[in-house]
Image (cartoon, rainbow, N blue to C red):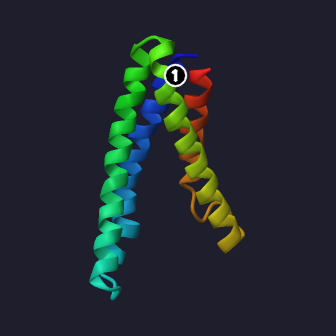
Amino acid sequence: MRYLFLLAALLCLGMLVIHVLMGGIETLNPLMASPLALEVRVAILAIWHGMTLFFILSALAFFWAFAVDQVRSRPIGLLLGAFYTVFAAIIASLSFLWFEDLMILPQWTLLAPIGIFALIASI
């Protein structure tokens, strides 16, 4: 089961690459060039960079959790696993409620496995 932490870490890195490349091109750059108020654009920029940092730090935490014993890794796995699982549920719910299509916001398809793997590895 410990290998699920390693898999979660690798998925975090994959999510990071997608976030930086596709998120920047398809979401961040158009929003920053939009006529939204400057305060809104800067808030979006801060959140985007915060998520970038979160993916990096959680990947490091999952690599650490893979390397140490289960007793020490359990709190990290449970906390990050819950976060990723709930975040995936929020995105999937919003995608379905607003667009009636789960794949309009497909981020949940990577966030959910990260969370599930972390939770299972913590048991």
Q: With 118 as the anchor, is 31 left or right in this view?
A: left
Image quarter in which the N terminus is found? top right
Of residues 76 and 59, the one nearer the viewer is 76
Q: 99 or 74, which lies in front?
A: 74
**What residue sits right under mark 1 in the picture?**
74
Count of labels in the image: 1
Whole-percent x, y for residue 67 in the image: 39, 15
Q: Is residue 33 left or right of residue 66?
A: left
The answer to which quarter of the image holds residue 12 is: top left
- Does 77 appear above or below 88? above
Q: Residue at x 66, y 73 (%)?
A: 98
Is 31 positioned to the left or the right of 105 in the image?
left
* Outermost residue, bottom side: 35
Residue 26 coordinates in the image, percent (x, y): 40, 68
**Where does residue 10 sit, x and y in percent of width and height?**
43, 32
Q: Amino acid at mark 1?
A: Arg
* In the depicted structure, whether residue 1 falls above or below residue 106: above
Q: Secondary structure at mark 1?
A: helix
Rendered residue at 34%/31% (across/down): 60
Residue at image position (49%, 31%) is 8
Q: Is residue 2 left or right of residue 47?
A: right
Q: Position of residue 102 (x, y in %)?
A: 67, 61
